[in-house]
Image (cartoon, rainbow, N blue to C red):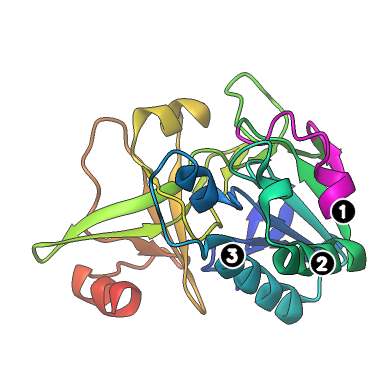
Amino acid sequence: MVRFSFCGVELAALGSGALYWPARRALLVADLHFEKASWYARSGQMLPPYDTAATLAELEAIVASCAPAEIWCLGDSFHDAGGCARMAPSEQARLRTLTGALRWHWIVGNHDRGAADMADRCGGAVMAEALVDGLLLTHEADPAEKRPELSGHFHPKLRLTLRGRHVARRCFVASETKLILPAFGALTGGMDAHDPVIRRAVGGGRAQALVPLADRMLRFPLAAGKPPPLAGREESDQPFTSTGFSRHIWG
């Protein structure tokens, strides 16, 4: 967990893609996409049906570690409006244990829009967006929004080529007033953080991909029209060589 400041608010980023807000004891996650595999199975694409269990296990571990008082899920928590109803009874019970123990909030995303029974079946409170202590919590970043904004939707990943190897890691994308969380779900793809769609979403100005390590934050400028960098800079802004980056990040 690495602490950093966003619009004057101290936050902490986890390598899993979760975000912790110490002052509120709040945990934020985006794009869980529960029951994505079962949605594909309905159309004949038989994926291993373990994504919900894996995502729940990761979420339970972080809750046990951080001991939050509240959780904000920033949209696309279920892969479709019927996802909550399709959950196996044992997994739905695990989720209800979490939602019953914490102040749980579901921000509605484009995938789970219309899931009116989400709170009834799985607990928690459902809302379109929320303004919390000056930060707007929503699903998809709005370039025209002037208030500081936390969102998901784009599943950002930092993609690099290091010593001939193509590597990718989930990352946060930050600009002066916007912070996009990576997808937390076990069965989610990702969009290159350099993609023009992401740059437009954060306002098109200065933006960075943030990759948290155990004890530091790596920052990668997302320059328009430029290829992904081969090395990042640490929080201290000291150079970090591509060899060191490969060793510490990609193993």
Amino acid tagged 2: Leu
Disc 1 crowd, CA 10 A, few/some/many (<14, 14-19, 20+) = many
Mark sitting on residue 98: 2
Tell me if residue 2 can be seen: no
Residue 99 spot, x, y in % from top left: 85, 61
Check if mark 2's residue and mark 1's residue have beta carbons within 8 Å: yes
Ranked by sequence position, the earlier of labels 3 and 2 is: 3
First in sequence, mark 2 or 1: give its number. Answer: 2
User: What residue is disc 1 on?
Assistant: 123
Is residue 214 in the magenta section?
no
- Local secondary structure at mark 2: helix
Nearer the observer, 188 or 44: 44
The answer for how far apart the CA atoms under marks 1 and 3 are is: 17 Å
Task: Answer yes or no: is residue 64 visible.
Answer: yes
Mark 2: give few (<14), some (14-19) or many (20+) Cα within 10 Å. Answer: many
Q: At 49% from the left edge and 52% from the top edge, which residue is drawn?
A: 37
Please tell me whether residue 144 is drawn above or below residue 109 in the rendered image: above
What secondary structure is marked by label 3?
helix
Magenta-highlighted residues? 111-129
Foreground of the two, 41 or 83: 41
Q: Which mark is residue 55?
A: 3
